[in-house]
Amino acid sequence: MCGTVLQNKMPLFPLLLLFLNEFIKYLYYFNNWMESQ
């Protein structure tokens, strides 16, 4: 219920969360890759 209210106020908020999630995942894998070199 609260999520739909947030989406109505800020339609880009879920997109921003998705982008941040992917970005953090990318940084995490990149860091692991650099350490394994």
Image (cartoon, helix red, strand yellow):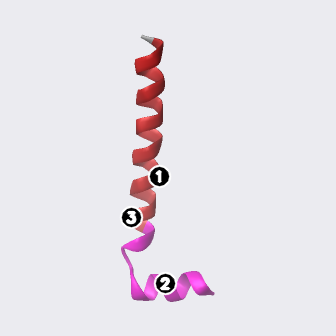
Q: What kind of secondary structure does the magenta stretch mostly adopt?
A: helix
Q: CA distance from mark 3 to mark 2?
A: 13 Å
> Seen from this angle, which residue lies furthest top?
37
Tag 1, which secondary structure?
Answer: helix
Q: Earlier in the sequence, mark 1 or mark 2?
A: 2
Q: If you read the primary sequence from the N terminus, does the residue marked by circle 3 or circle 2 appear first?
A: 2
Residue 21: x, y in percent? 47, 52
**Left or right: residue 20 compared with residue 3:** left
Q: Say which mark, if any, is on residue 6.
A: 2
Instruction: Find residue 19 and report its image quarter.
Output: bottom left
Give, as a three-letter code, the residue at label 3. Answer: Leu
Label whose residue precedes the other's in the sequence (1 or 3): 3
Q: Which residue is mark 1?
A: 21
Residue at position x 44%, y 21% in the image: 33
Q: In which quadrant is the C terminus drawn?
A: top left
If the image is split into quadrants, where does the N terminus sit?
A: bottom right
Query: Which image quadrant is residue 34 in?
Result: top left
Instruction: Check if mark 1's residue and mark 2's residue have beta carbons within 8 Å.
Output: no
Query: Quick check: marks 3 and 2 in contact, CB under 8 Å?
Result: no
Residue type marked 2: Leu
- Is disc 2 surrounded by few (<14), some (14 to 19) or many (20+) residues within 10 Å? few
Relative to 12, residue 30 above or below: above
For label 2, the SS is helix
For label 3, count other residues whose C-alpha is less than 10 Å away and answer few (under 14), some (14-19) or many (20+). few
Vertical side of 5 occupied by 32: above or below: above
Question: On residue 16, which mark appears?
Answer: 3
First to last magenta residue range: 1-14
- In contact (CB < 8 Å): disc 1 and disc 3: no
Give the residue drawn at x 41%, y 72%.
13
Instruction: Give the x, y percent position of residue 32.
Output: 48, 24
